[in-house]
Amino acid sequence: MKHLLSTVVISSALLVGAPSTAAQSTKGVFGGIQYVGSSVDVKSAAEDLEFGGGFGVHAGLGLSDTWSVLANFDRSVLPGVKNTSDVTLSQYDALLRMNLLPGASSPFRVFLAAGATARTANAGRDFEDIAPTGGAGAQLFVTSKIAVNGTALWTFGKLTRASQLRNGQEGQFESTGTRVQAGVSLYLFGK
């Protein structure tokens, strides 16, 4: 929880403290990098996967000043509990992003994101699934081509034990994944 709070504070400082510039179109191709903090809460598990950090990359296409499609990959290392090994959590997102406020005339944007996430988690025990994801975030253009981003995402669904998938046995666990991302995007065709 302490790491989650630190990530939120850093993301907020980046978004609030960055200098404002003229309005920027979000149309066109963009890509970037981000720091990510993740945790997974597994229903009826003896222990949850505690918060851990990592890094990721993203790429997208702005269809208009309101709508963008986004592909995202990140990997976090979540610490093991009670002398268990660390868990590597990899997440692949396909998201649709909708800019809400204040509009195309501002360098600051608030957005909603929704889509699907494929997850794998392993540390001697493997899990995988594809599940719905939703969240919200903010973006501030610091130049005509560079924006800083802060996003919170929640992934809901079942984690399936991968070894049992191969054996055709049931082994699904209800889970909620939480992520906080702070990153930078480069818009290739800025004004």
Image (cartoon, rainbow, N blue to C red):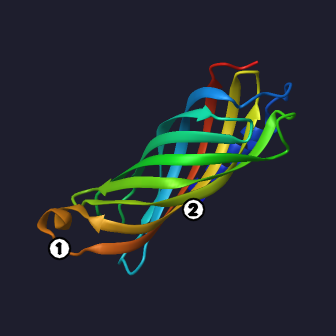
Q: Answer few, some or many: residues within 10 Å of disc 2's Cα (few below 14, many 20 plus, some between 14 and 19).
A: few
Q: Position of residue 99 (x, y in %)?
A: 73, 45
Residue highlighted by disc 1: 169
- Answer yes or no: do the residues labelled 2 and 1 have beta carbons within 8 Å? no
- Image quadrant of residue 164? bottom left
Asked if 43 appears above or below 183 in the picture, the reply is below
Q: Residue at x 12, y 67 (%)?
A: 167
Residue drawn where x is 75% and y is 39% of the image: 15
**Mark pair 2, 1: CA separation:** 35 Å
x 45%, y 64%: residue: 40
Mark carried by residue 1: 2
Q: Residue 21 placed where, x, y %? A: 85, 25
Residue 10 seen in the figure: no
| Figure check: 14 above or below 8 | above
Q: Which quadrant holds the C terminus?
A: top right
Give the number of the mark in front: 2 or 1: 1
Q: Secondary structure at mark 2?
A: loop
The crowd level at tag 1 (other Cα within 10 Å; few <14, some 14-19, many 20+) is few
Residues 145 and 189: in front is: 189
Residue found 52% across the figure and 50% down from its top: 37
